[in-house]
Image (cartoon, rainbow, N blue to C red):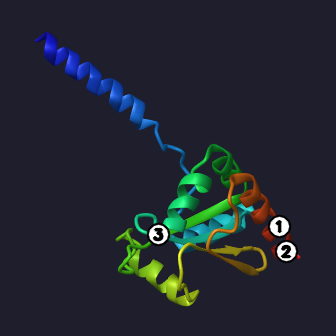
Amino acid sequence: MFMFKKIFTTFLICLFAFSSYGAIQLPLVESFEDAKKQSKEEKKLLVLHFTGTTWCPPCKFLDGKILHTKEFAKFAKENLVIVEMDFARNGKPSNEKFADEYKKLAEEFSIRSFPTMIFINPQNDKQEIMKGVAAKDVKSFIKYIKDIRKRLDK
């Protein structure tokens, strides 16, 4: 009985320790139409993020070292509405519910490489595209997005 309690206690400690690991959540919206509406109402920049988080090295870097940090999550919550479209290596979206929508958007925006982000000002529909990783750290990526916002607001 003592051994069971010890194993169970160790299990619970590990469970709680790892449950917060990587738990930084971005303000993601699954539906493009919902995101477009929300970004317009809240006057936030709409971001379409085409990624391959399980197989694409630059996507993994962007996801792990920039996007899922506390600093970027705070910035995103205040300034962005993000639709993250994660694709498998075979081109199939990982979100089955929105797979058709994500494929259509990838075709509409001629996505040929990952990661690609489309930044859209919902007030005037101006857009700018980022292919690859535009910054090597969070601070410079936030500055990059702020500069995009300024250009799209003109």
Where's residue 47, x and y in %? 64, 69
Local SS, label 2 = helix
- In x, y percent, where is residue 139? 75, 53
Labelled disc at residue 147 = 1
Separation of marks 2 and 3 at Cα, in angstroms: 29 Å
- The answer to whether residue 128 is seen in the rendering is yes
Label located before the other in sequence (2 or 3): 3
- Compared across the picture, whether 89 is left or right of 134 comes to left
Q: Quadrant for residue 137, please give it.
A: bottom right
Look at mark 2 in the image and give the residue it sits on: 151
Mark nearer the N terminus (1 vs 3): 3
Q: Is residue 6 left or right of residue 124?
A: left
- Looking at the rendered structure, the kind of residue marked 3 is Cys
Which is in the foreground here, disc 1 or disc 3?
A: 3
Residue 110 location (% of width, % of height) = 56, 89
Relative to 67, residue 128 above or below: below
Which residue type does callout 1 highlight?
A: Asp
Which residue is pictured at 53% across the width and 86% down the height? Answer: 112
* Pointer 2 with pointer 1, Cβ within 8 A: yes
Q: CA distance from mark 2 to mark 1?
A: 6 Å
